Amino acid sequence: MTSVSASSHFIVRDNIRLHHLDWGGNGRHPVVLVHGVRLHAHVWNHFSRRFRDRFHIVALDQRGHGDSGWGAAAESYHIEDFYGDLRAVVEARGLSRFTLIGHSLGGVVSMLFAHRHHDQLERLVLVDVTAGRPVVPAGADLSRITETQPPREFDSLESATDYVRQTMALAPRHMVEESVRCGIRRSDDGRYTWKYDPVLFRRRRPPTAAMDFWQLVSSIPTPTLLQYGSHSRVVTPELAARMAQTMPNCTVERIEGAGHALFTDQPEAFAASVERFLVKMGSE
């Protein structure tokens, strides 16, 4: 099943129109999903369809991504900006005691939110992201490992899908097809281009500059699940172990046969891992 069954909602913050998907289920336990850089709210569609009858699922398009508006300049994409957007959506929807799930950049945003508002959270899930980064050559862009790659324009959806498949070789083709279809738009000249601000492609200064996230996560009491892929080049076993030692209440689970985008590479294993964590926490 590839159809989307969620309603679109918008709020405005900093003169930016922010989009999020609501999969229904008001009154059920809320689950808020925050994607990574150059991705979009629809990357969670498989998970959302699977659990929409059990949870109230809200998936964000972060500023500069998907159907949300773009920042006025590169300086509009600091971690504080993404954090403020998440907080604004949560407040607009009146959510409390919810589960927050964040991937990559979205995971970093989620860590900051959990640090400042742990009283609002029941659980936290970090998807292939930690408070630190692996040692890589100078100038390496870790976000390019499994997320949308250049070139930025294609003649067809099929050619865009084929290109992304070169990077996401572990993922089922239908998952890549849906992600590409929801993350691309047709430009005036008839070609297809990604639905994210090009500034995000050019930016080299980390949005978390000058923030010590190891210190930050050490004070997060929220029950936390850290997932990382067996083929990930973003989260190493050493970084995962350090998170388990640093965070007061952190469980680590490795997802076999997955790279950075666990939910696309191994959608069933990703969903089952989250489900086990939610059930376990709900029984304690």
Image (spheres, rainbow, N blue to C red):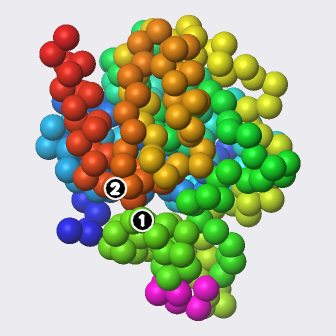
Nearer-N-terminus badge (1/2)? 1
Q: Is residue 187 left or right of residue 96?
A: right
* Residue 252 appears in the rendering: yes
**Which residue corresponds to mark 2?**
266
Q: Which residue is mark 1?
A: 170
At 34% across and 55% down in the image, what residue appears? 266
Front-most of residues 133 and 28: 133
Q: Position of residue 37 (x, y in %)?
A: 61, 51
Residue at 32%, 46% in the rendered image: 270
Q: Is residue 57 magenta?
A: no
* In this view, 46 is above or below 24: below
Please tell me which residue lies in front, 225 or 120: 225
Q: CA distance from mark 1 to mark 2?
A: 8 Å
Q: Is residue 141 above or below residue 215?
A: below
Judged from the image, the secondary structure of the residue bearing numbered disc 2 is: loop
The three-letter amino acid code for the residue at tag 1 is Leu
